[in-house]
Amino acid sequence: MDLEDERYCRWRVTTYLDKILAAHRRAAAADERAVDELVKQALAAPPARGFARALLGGNAGLAVIAEVKRRSPSKGALNIELDPATMARAYADGGASCLSVLTDVDHFGGSAADLQQARAAVGIPVLRKDFTVSEHDVCDARIMGADCVLLIAAALTDEELRRFHGLALEVGLDVLVEIHDEAELERALNAGASMIGVNQRDLVTFEVDHERARRMGGLIPASVISVAESGVRGADDARALREAGYRAVLVGESLVTASDPAAAVSALRGVRA
């Protein structure tokens, strides 16, 4: 990685987030599986369900990507003992357009099995939520059954972002490119992103900045599916984001800790600008 590329990697600060990314890159470097064989396996997987298409369907309300998430580095345990299939069915019953499933094992308590169990329980598409840092990660997402993969602009160089985005499309995945600011929006668009998520939570401080999300919502081209991520506490937050131009919200913590996840999703789903 040269200096020009390195300046885009915001996880240079030595925090636990930096350690998470470093751990994933070490694992990727040690992965000796042939990428060509993984691509063949990914191409042989059953057809994806159409993640982006699901976000555009339905009524004029806000699309909800409901997340299966056991824990987080900032909040600790959220719902460690959750059953992915039961949670997925509750989300679908509430009207979720798509699911997001954490597959990071060490830091979020997730797994590929969580994704597979959630997806098998419902008919809606699923995003693999993880730290994608290699071609192996992209192919693994498709092989394990994901319909969409997350690419975090702040964690990747321009070349990686373009390469992984192209590979994901090649193997049949939709791609959600996560950004935080104007510079990352430009990078995402240059990489060909047609679905962009704005993370309201700072990757280093974990503070939520609702104003930044509202500002960024007005900058994303209308031709791009815009998703607001993190920090959505309920219908009021969701309504403000819908009014800022977002087509969908990705919500985890407030749903996995809700006493009635289906009702919580329904409340978000009914939001209109």
Image (tube, helix red, strand yellow):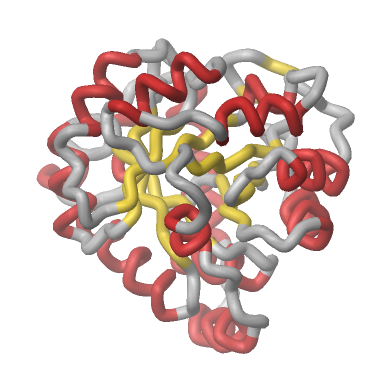
Residue 185, how many percent across, how many down?
A: 19, 42
Q: Residue at x 34, y 34 (%)?
A: 198
Residue 153 located left or right of residue 182: right
Can you give x and y, in whole percent of width and height, for residue 129 in the image? Answer: 56, 46
| Relative depth, front residue between 61 and 159 | 61
Q: Is residue 19 visible?
A: yes
Q: Is residue 155 visible?
A: no
What percent of the width, then of the height, locates residue 239? Answer: 42, 23
Which quarter of the image is occupied by the C terminus? top left
Q: Residue at x 65, y 32 (%)?
A: 265
Residue at x-position 18% and y-position 33% = 218
Number of marks: 0
Q: Is residue 13 above or below residue 133?
A: above
Is residue 26 rendered to the left or right of residue 101? left
> Compared with residue 71, is residue 115 higher up or lower down, i.e. above or below?
below
Q: Position of residue 144 (x, y in %)?
A: 69, 66
Which residue is nearer to you in this view: 172 or 15?
A: 172
* 107 left or right of 155 in image: right
Front in this rendered view, residue 12 or 64: 64
Task: Give the camera-side residue of 125 and 83.
Answer: 125
Question: Which picture quadrant has residue 167?
Answer: bottom left
- Residue 73's place in the image compared with 173, above or below, is above
Residue lying at 85% horizontally and 48% vertically, measured from the top left: 85
